[in-house]
Amino acid sequence: MAEVRPDEISAIIRRQLSGFESEVDIYDVGTVLQVGDGIARVYGLSKVMASELVEFPNDVLGMVLNLEEDSVGCVLFGESTLVKEGDTVKRTKRVASMPVGEEMLGRVINPLGLPIDGKGSVNASTYLPIERKALGVIQRQPVKEPLQTGITAIDAMIPIGRGQRELIIGDRQTGKTAVAIDTIINQKYTHSEEAKKLGIKPVYCIYVAIGQKSSTIAQVFAKLQEHGAMDFTTVISAAASVPAPLQFIAPYSGATLGEYFRDNGKHALVIYDDLSKQAAAYRELSLLLRRPPGREAYPGDVFYLHSRLLERASKLSEDLGGGSLTALPIIETQQSDVSAYIPTNVISITDGQTYLESNLFNAGVRPAINVGISVSRVGGNAQIKAMKKVAGTLRTDLAQYRELEAFSKFGSDLDKVTLRILAKGARLVELLKQDQYAPMPVERQVISIFLGTNGYLDSLKISDIKKFEKEILEYIELKYNHIFETIKKEKDLSESLIKDIRKAADEFLSTFKKR
Amino acid sequence: MVDSKVSFRYASSLLGLAVEKKILDAVSMDIEFLKSAIQENAHLRSLLESPVVKPQIKASIIEEILSKGHTETKKFVRFVIDKSRENLLYGIASKFLELRDEHIGFVTVSIKTAYEFTDEQKKRLKEKLENFLNKKVGFSFKIDKSLIGGFVAQVNDTVYNASLKHQLDLLRVQLLENSSYIGQKN
């Protein structure tokens, strides 16, 4: 710790004291009637607003959720043991809000915007309310720029556009968070000088952790830092140990911070990990507030809970600066049951969903994306032309493969056509496997899918495919780097470029086979 | 909650009647008397709440208590008992007094001070507050040593805090601002 000189301290105190004004302070109060389980009923506070922040003793903050005829229902953001019956509650006259700004990048904050990483306070001057209305039709425009996740299977077949809401859904231990973290890491490229030259705008990321173990959040933070992704990322942490009200508002804080970037003409990506836990937290406090339970004991407005959150993701019109807020909500299913209440709700709200399956995961297909049932309803418009060209046949090839896969298990004699489809499918599946924390730039994805769909892998052993892919990409980078450069610049595959790729592939394939 | 709604209905109609017949002072005196009677006498309270006691007996007891009261008050009380709402009489009385204060522009201000105010100070405070609130002011004084100095005035839900203790609390918050202490606590 730096040395502190006593005279400096007294100078600081003197400065602080000189700005202190003593006047009669006027504020509104109420009295706690009943407190427990993170809920307080308050008498008084007659002019309080819905979702206003109120102050309890011992620095505990609360938020007003129920306005009743003779009492007010508040949720507590702190320990309910610190509040007693008969305590005075003060109005703050501000609706629950949080500080926003670029200063938040690189920080770990709680859902109220207070830093919890021990790096001192955040000097953000702008405050925005946590609950904001989503934009209307006039302020928006269709999604048109791609948001590269760096995961080949997603970027090729389930593309995500800036301003889209794409659900990541799957059982526990299927790599949902991994997909999200890889996506954040891949945004590092958008902050580089090269991306600036190519006209790719930077994407700021917000990772909202809801109801997770603190150790898991710390791991995610460490991974992001290790890959240099914390420079443009904010982690909002509402761990499993914090009171349910904080877990409930955490995604809204994330959306508010994202909206700050969006409204300033920038691009933001916010990950809600995960909304099932948020729904459970909301159920907890709704039941404590004595709101009537409905299906699966969730309150009646649990659909609105998620729809108003995800509706805030948007692509702004050019008049408003053309910023965007992309949302990647995560939902954890139980035993792959997507017909449970929360999964069906969120599926119907979002613009598509990415299914992750545990049997694929266990079979070694990682990322364990089931491309057959995963869809992206708007992202196709945002794909670059080169990717559209090569990925067109990928989907159908894989669909045919899956259809015939069941037959291959019988081991019976199959005709040549079937065998070819099976061989190709198996190779494509192998090609789409990808390591964690190793996102792939789009130009490389294009080349590798091109090789897969054009039969360059058919003569290779399945176990060699990953090695082949890695080496040929290195080879092209060394000898035919203009291929990558052209794809990056023109975002399209011209006839001459395809010829070059074929030439390079033929050359490398012959040397690879000799080894 | 239903109770408070019902009390409000009865109280507001009695107020309307009293204002219309220009007997507000007389009626409020009766009601004040009735309220304190119920408040101070536990037997009376349990009698009113008991479903076993016949309404006629309840009516005759209340009538005897209010023997010197205005006829309109008596009529009102009999009406309340008739509708078997006698258990709400206390609530109706308090609500009535609240509504009357609002009607005539009178507020009760509870004042907490560190030391007893002199009469001169009380007079000046009253003048100040009446000007400020634009209403007639009644006081209830309380002494709270923990305030150290100054006073705290509360009008309904609004607090006017001019105590030394509060100033020190504010100073604490200001000094803690920009330090990471608050953030870490949460």
Image (cartoon, coloured by chain):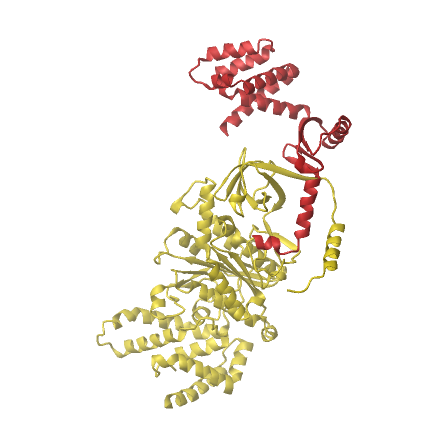
Up/down of A382 relative to B57, above or below: below
Q: Please provide percent x and percent y for residue A227.
A: 52, 71
Q: Please provide percent x and percent y for residue A104.
A: 60, 60
Up/down of B154 relative to A511, above or below: above
**Quadrant position of residue B153:** top right
- Determine the residue positioned at 59% across, 22% down: B96
User: In front: A278, or A429?
Assistant: A278
Judged left or right of residue A415, residue A22 is: right
- Determine the residue positioned at 68% across, 64% down: A3
Q: Give the letter of the yellow chain.
A: A
Q: Please provide percent x and percent y for residue A270.
A: 52, 60
User: In front: A250, or B79?
Assistant: A250
Q: Give the letter of the red chain.
A: B
- Inspect this view and state whether residue A146 appears: no
- Inspect this view and state whether residue A12 appears: yes
User: In front: B67, or A141?
Assistant: B67
